[in-house]
Image (cartoon, rainbow, N blue to C red):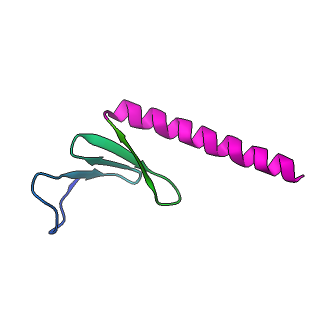
């Protein structure tokens, strides 16, 4: 879905979904904390980066929980 805000410049386009944003020719993904991570040059790379991010956060949380027990 192409979304343009009244304040956007014409040469800057945003393609939004619930978690992914394309700005110009680069992709970003949104974390649960509301941060956008990127840029990534392709959809495939943004999906892979998101998968690695989730894996890293999950591992970190498990490690922190195990240390507190």
How many marks can you see? Answer: 0
- Magenta residues? 41-69
Q: Residue at x 69, y 41 (%)?
A: 59
Residue 9 locus on image (x, y percent): 12, 59
Residue 3 as seen in the image, left or right of residue 57: left
| In the image, farthest residue toward the left | 10
Residue 44 location, quadrant: top left
Q: Which of 37 and 31 is in front in this view?
A: 37
Q: Which residue is drawn at 75% across and 45% down?
A: 62
Q: Which of 37 and 16 is in front in this view?
A: 37
Please indicate, yes or no, whether residue 1 appears anywhere in the rendered image.
no
Residue 38 locus on image (x, y percent): 39, 44
Please indicate, yes or no, whether residue 20 appears anywhere in the rendered image.
yes
Residue 67 as seen in the image, left or right of residue 33: right
Q: Does the magenta stretch include residue 40?
A: no
Q: Which residue is drawn at 43% across and 36% down?
A: 47
Q: Which of 47 and 11 is in front in this view?
A: 11
Residue 63 location, quadrant: top right
Residue 1 as seen in the image, left or right of residue 17: left
Instruction: Say above or below: 35 vs 46.
Output: below
Residue 35 locus on image (x, y percent): 46, 57
Residue 61 locus on image (x, y percent): 71, 49
Residue 46 location, quadrant: top left
């Amino acid at each position: 879905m192409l979304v343009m805000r009244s304040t956007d410049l014409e040469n800057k386009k945003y393609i939004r979904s619930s978690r992914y944003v394309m700005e110009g020719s680069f992709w970003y993904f949104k974390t649960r904390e509301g941060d956008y991570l990127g840029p990534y040059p392709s959809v495939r790379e943004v999906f892979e980066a998101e998968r690695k991010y989730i894996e890293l956060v999950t591992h970190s949380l498990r490690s922190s929980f195990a240390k507190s027990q």
